[in-house]
């Protein structure tokens, strides 16, 4: 018998028994059907395991990729996956200089934005604007391009809260309806140079709410000044979107994150353990964000992002359809394992159950693995700091190199380093 010393609360144990016995039982977002029944599970005090005799298909995991992050598109949740993936394998990230958190974003990346390396790069992940010419010159020939997008209205609501747009733009009573109905006016106030200190990392005359996803994907929309602007040319916009579709192997959809992660796992030949994650930067709704006419007003203001979302939402479901029925079986299995990991790592606010572990045995969707308290820590920690330290160990830069070559550019953005 394996005794982990972990004490799950009674309500959780009762819940798990009900979930495992009742086929088709549904609770909140987690639905478990089809492949597993009560006999597939063993509870040894507080050690849970899944029995299976399935064989696993073998493939070679892909390690060279670019992930384009767009603000408020579940990018910090993805960070718990991608940074952990690269950190554990000591892969070489393209990292911002000094304590910067962006790779030149919202400008196209330049040499002064990233740390030099004597080794080939494997991953671009930190915030950057997609530019194939620049990025392909940095990355290996077999690099895979990935991004995630979000339903534009939902992204607007999240941005309004997260960036305190109403307060900075002087919206009366921070009223969201007032903001949307006069969005062009308030967007100019928010991006005005006079508000620079309040915005922090957001440069002057840059919009966080007008076609931002298009901008992050490299579409020329007039920023910075003197850059070409195709926003008034619908034909050019659609041609650019088709061009992006050919270059990106996967465009994930935030509203369907679990489905997106299964597609990512299969495409990259990753393991189920690799896509386990901790949800970050989720904001509670603080006021009513009524759609109605507001939705149509915003759609007119940020119409390119709506076109992008509709286009890639359609391509996303075509990819899912091509996966076959076992995709949905794996989806259900993944949801269950993710729930177990969440309970193990983060129940009762305890993010580091030291010395404890959870064994997930082999199934037709994963090899056996042991999830330890250290893994919980990696999922919840701000790993950009660890990646910088790892870079320093591998590169062993001299102090004079740091001060002489890594000068923080005027457009650089850095925050105080959070504690682990």
Image (spheres, rainbow, N blue to C red):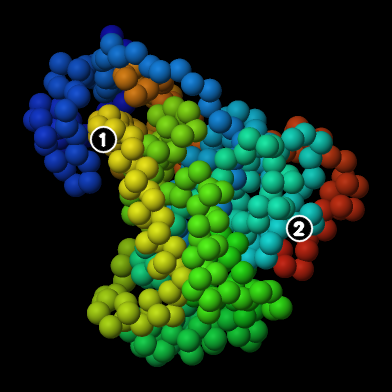
Question: Mark 1 or mark 2, which is nearer the start of the sequence?
Answer: 2
Could you say where residue 91 lies in the image, as x and y percent from the top left?
Answer: 65, 33
Identify which residue is drawn at 37% across, 22% down. Answer: 366
Q: Nearer the viewer, mark 2 or mark 1?
A: 1
Identify which residue is drawn at 31% across, 26% down. Answer: 6
Q: Please determine whether, in this image, residue 345 is positioned above or below residue 199.
A: above
Q: Please determine whether, in this image, residue 170 is positioned above or below residue 13.
A: below
Question: How many neighbours does mark 1 have within 10 angstroms: few (below 14), some (14-19), or many (20 or more)?
Answer: some
Question: How many neighbours does mark 2 have within 10 angstroms: few (below 14), some (14-19), or many (20 or more)?
Answer: few
Please give left or right for residue 108 compared with residue 153 in the image: right
Please, which residue is most extreme toward the top here?
Answer: 1
Could you say where residue 12 lies in the image, as x and y percent from the top left?
Answer: 19, 35
Please give left or right for residue 89 compared with residue 18 in the image: right
Number of numbered discs? 2
Would you name the residue on which mark 2 appears? 110
Would you name the residue on which mark 1 appears? 328
Please, which residue is most extreme toward the left here?
Answer: 22
Identify which residue is drawn at 69% across, 41% down. Answer: 139
């Amino acid at each position: 018998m394996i005794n982990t010393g972990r004490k799950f609360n009674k309500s959780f144990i009762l819940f798990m028994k009900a979930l495992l016995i009742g086929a088709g039982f549904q609770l909140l977002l987690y639905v478990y059907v089809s492949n597993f029944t009560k006999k597939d599970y063993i509870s040894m005090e507080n050690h849970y395991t899944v029995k299976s005799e399935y064989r696993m298909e073998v493939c070679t995991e892909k390690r060279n990729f670019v992930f384009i992050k767009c603000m408020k598109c579940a990018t910090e949740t993805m960070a718990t996956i991608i940074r952990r993936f690269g950190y554990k394998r000591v892969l070489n990230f393209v990292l911002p200089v000094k304590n910067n958190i962006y790779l030149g974003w919202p400008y196209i990346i330049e040499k002064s934005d990233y740390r030099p390396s004597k080794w080939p790069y494997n991953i671009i992940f930190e915030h950057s604007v997609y530019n194939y010419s620049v990025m392909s010159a940095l990355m290996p020939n077999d690099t895979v391009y990935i991004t995630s997008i979000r339903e534009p209205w939902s992204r607007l609501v999240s941005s309004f809260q997260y960036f305190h747009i109403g307060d900075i733009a002087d919206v009366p009573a921070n009223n969201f309806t007032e903001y949307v109905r006069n969005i062009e006016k308030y967007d100019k106030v928010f991006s005005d140079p006079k508000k620079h200190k309040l915005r922090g990392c957001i440069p002057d005359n840059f919009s966080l709410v007008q076609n931002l996803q298009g901008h992050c994907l490299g579409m020329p929309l007039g920023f910075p000044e003197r850059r070409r602007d195709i926003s008034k040319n619908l034909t050019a916009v659609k041609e650019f979107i088709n061009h992006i579709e050919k270059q990106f192997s996967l465009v994930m959809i935030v509203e369907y994150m679990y489905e997106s992660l299964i597609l990512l796992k299969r495409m990259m030949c990753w393991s189920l353990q690799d896509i386990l994650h901790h949800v970050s930067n989720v904001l509670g709704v603080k006021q009513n964000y009524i759609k109605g006419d507001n939705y149509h007003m915003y759609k007119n203001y940020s119409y390119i992002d709506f076109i992008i979302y509709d286009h890639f939402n359609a391509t996303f479901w075509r990819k899912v359809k091509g996966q076959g029925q076992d995709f949905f079986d794996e989806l259900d299995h993944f949801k269950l394992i993710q729930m177990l990991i969440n309970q193990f790592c983060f129940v009762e606010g305890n993010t580091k159950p030291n010395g404890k572990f959870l064994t997930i045995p082999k199934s037709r969707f994963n090899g056996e693995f042991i999830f330890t308290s250290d893994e919980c820590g990696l999922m919840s920690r701000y790993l950009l700091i660890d990646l910088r330290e790892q870079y320093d160990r591998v590169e062993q830069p001299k102090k004079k190199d740091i001060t002489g070559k890594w000068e923080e550019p005027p457009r650089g953005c850095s925050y105080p380093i959070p504690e682990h």
